[in-house]
Image (cartoon, helix red, strand yellow):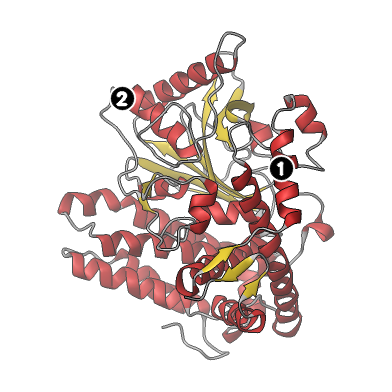
């Protein structure tokens, strides 16, 4: 464990994790044990136990060491697959390690910039830009360059600011940090496009710069090792979606069912899956390790239209050994906020599952959802004009789903703001943000205080 004393050296303790990550393993049991040890060590580390000023000075180097550690671990997944070591426990171990080390790296970045916030430091940055070590790049690619060069067929994993982004990231049994994925296509003129499927628009083609400037806080660039396959996949999906958006085409709507192998409609990951499946003639089909949606309390899932127990979640690309992790970007002025959103959503879903909380509509929510459904019939330009008043509701989103999204937002928002105040207090008093365990403790106190009604969640007692 990282030593819990003020004089402890973070760098020395990080070296212990690096040794564990680099240790050769020949059995699934040892792989599982090492991954669990890395996770437990990182998850229980508290920055308040270290020299925060020293950490701030060496934060850039520490962040790269953590990034390189994750790149190295990912690079060995194919080897472990060949050895037959990728048991369910090992798969979960990799996911847990990747998640917790991202959080540690985020906190280093936050400390390095003095916990600046958007209001103090301008607007949200466009993805893969910024001067505060925002973009971490794989040694094998483009370290020490300016703008990151993309390739046709690159896959970009992102996370936005909204509570529904946190919900999408947390909807399965895997605690993910990502809510969306899209594919880069570079045309003959050199123009860069993002082919993606958005809830409000369905399958669509946007300029890459627009997609990377769409209120995102985290983005990861993955590149398939077969550049030819990736280029064919990008060309196929670009042409396929372009045809659907033409005057004679039929729009491809967003697929709320989350079923990877059924129907014409596409959710974001399903679009990427289709591209590679078609380009490979059906020989490369993702995901290798699907996300389970096995909740006993299906109230929220039923309300939003999920009709499967396994899916291709955006973060499943994290575990695809055929892809290299090329670069990872984050806006450290906002990573603390989305971390609080993640933890809030963790607990909301846990409370639904453990204590049988379910959403209960009020008259006001029914009215809002009906108006939202009515706005779905407006033209795209009218929807854009009214987006500040009503969410841009797609034509195939049921009223019940509109209501569920609204109730989730209104339930999470006051909890999130309370956590923000506590987190700010921690930064003022200790110089570091709240530890995850302290956030979870605060959330449980909120549940105990609120009792059988938390926002629009009501506990159904047998």
In screen coordinates, is 263 left or right of 104?
Answer: left
Q: Which mark is residue 43?
A: none
In the image, residue 250 lies at what x, y percent? 54, 16
As helix, strand or loop, the secondary structure at mark 1 comes to helix
Task: Report the residue at 55% width, 64% height from top.
Answer: 358
Q: Which mark is residue 280?
A: 2
Against 284, residue 222 (above or below) is: below
In the image, residue 8 lies at what x, y percent? 52, 86
In the image, residue 309 lies at what x, y percent? 36, 50
Local packing at callout 1 (Cα closer than 10 Å; few below 14, some 14-19, many 20+) is: some
Front label number (2 vs 1)? 1
Number of numbered discs visible in the structure rendering: 2
Q: Are the residues flagged by discs 2 and 1 in contact, CB closer than 8 Å?
A: no
Q: CA distance from mark 2 to mark 1?
A: 43 Å
Q: Which residue is mark 1?
A: 370
Q: Quadrant of the N terminus?
A: bottom left
Q: Earlier in the sequence, mark 2 or mark 1?
A: 2
161 and 11: which is toward the camera: 161
Against 29, residue 338 (above or below) is: above
Task: Report the residue at 64% width, 46% height from top.
Answer: 402
In screen coordinates, is 387 left or right of 179?
Answer: right
Using the rendered image of the protein, determine whether residue 135 is visible from the camera's viewpoint.
Answer: no
Against 30, residue 325 (above or below) is: above
Task: Report the residue at 61% width, 74% height from top.
Answer: 55
Using the rendered image of the protein, determine whether residue 68 is visible from the camera's viewpoint.
Answer: yes
Against 300, residue 339 (above or below) is: below
């Amino acid at each position: 464990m990282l030593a819990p004393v003020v004089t402890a050296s973070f760098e020395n303790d990080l070296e212990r994790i690096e040794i564990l990550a680099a240790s050769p393993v020949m059995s699934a049991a040892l792989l599982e044990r090492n991954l669990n040890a890395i996770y437990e060590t990182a998850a229980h580390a508290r920055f308040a136990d270290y020299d925060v000023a020293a950490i701030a000075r060496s934060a850039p180097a520490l962040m790269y060491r953590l990034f390189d550690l994750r790149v190295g671990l990912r690079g060995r997944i194919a080897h472990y697959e060949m050895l037959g070591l990728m048991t369910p426990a090992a798969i979960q171990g990799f996911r847990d390690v990747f998640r917790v080390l991202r959080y540690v790296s985020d906190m280093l970045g936050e400390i390095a910039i003095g916990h600046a916030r958007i209001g103090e430091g301008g607007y949200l940055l466009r993805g893969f830009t910024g001067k505060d070590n925002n973009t971490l790049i794989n040694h094998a690619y483009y370290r020490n360059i300016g703008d990151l060069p993309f390739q046709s067929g690159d896959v970009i994993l992102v996370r936005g600011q909204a509570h529904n982004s946190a919900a999408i990231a947390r909807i399965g049994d895997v605690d993910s940090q990502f809510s969306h994925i899209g594919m880069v296509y570079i045309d003959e003129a050199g123009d860069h496009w993002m082919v993606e499927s958005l809830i409000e628009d369905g399958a669509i083609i946007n300029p890459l710069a627009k997609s990377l400037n769409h209120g995102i806080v985290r983005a990861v660039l993955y590149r398939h090792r077969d550049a030819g396959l990736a280029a064919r996949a990008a060309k196929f999906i670009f042409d396929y979606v372009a045809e659907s958006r033409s005057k004679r085409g039929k729009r491809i709507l967003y697929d709320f069912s989350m079923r990877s192998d059924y129907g014409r409609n596409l959710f974001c990951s399903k679009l990427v899956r289709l591209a590679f499946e078609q380009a490979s003639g059906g020989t490369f089909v993702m995901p290798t390790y699907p996300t389970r949606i096995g909740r006993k309390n299906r109230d929220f899932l039923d309300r939003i239209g999920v009709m499967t127990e396994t899916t291709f979640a955006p973060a499943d690309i994290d575990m695809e050994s055929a892809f290299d992790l090329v670069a990872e970007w984050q806006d450290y002025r906002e990573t603390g906020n989305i971390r609080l959103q993640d933890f809030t959503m963790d607990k909301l879903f846990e409370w639904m599952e453990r204590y049988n909380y379910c959403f209960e509509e009020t008259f006001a929510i029914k009215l809002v959802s009906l108006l939202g459904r009515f706005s779905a019939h407006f033209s795209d330009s009218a929807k854009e004009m009214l987006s500040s008043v009503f969410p841009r509701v797609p034509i195939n989103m049921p009223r019940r789903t509109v209501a569920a999204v609204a109730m989730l937002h209104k339930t999470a928002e006051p909890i999130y703001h309370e956590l923000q105040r506590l987190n700010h207090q921690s930064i003022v008093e200790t110089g570091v943000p709240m530890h995850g365990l302290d956030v979870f403790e605060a959330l449980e106190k909120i549940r105990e205080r609120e009792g059988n009604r938390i926002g629009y969640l009501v506990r159904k007692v047998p």
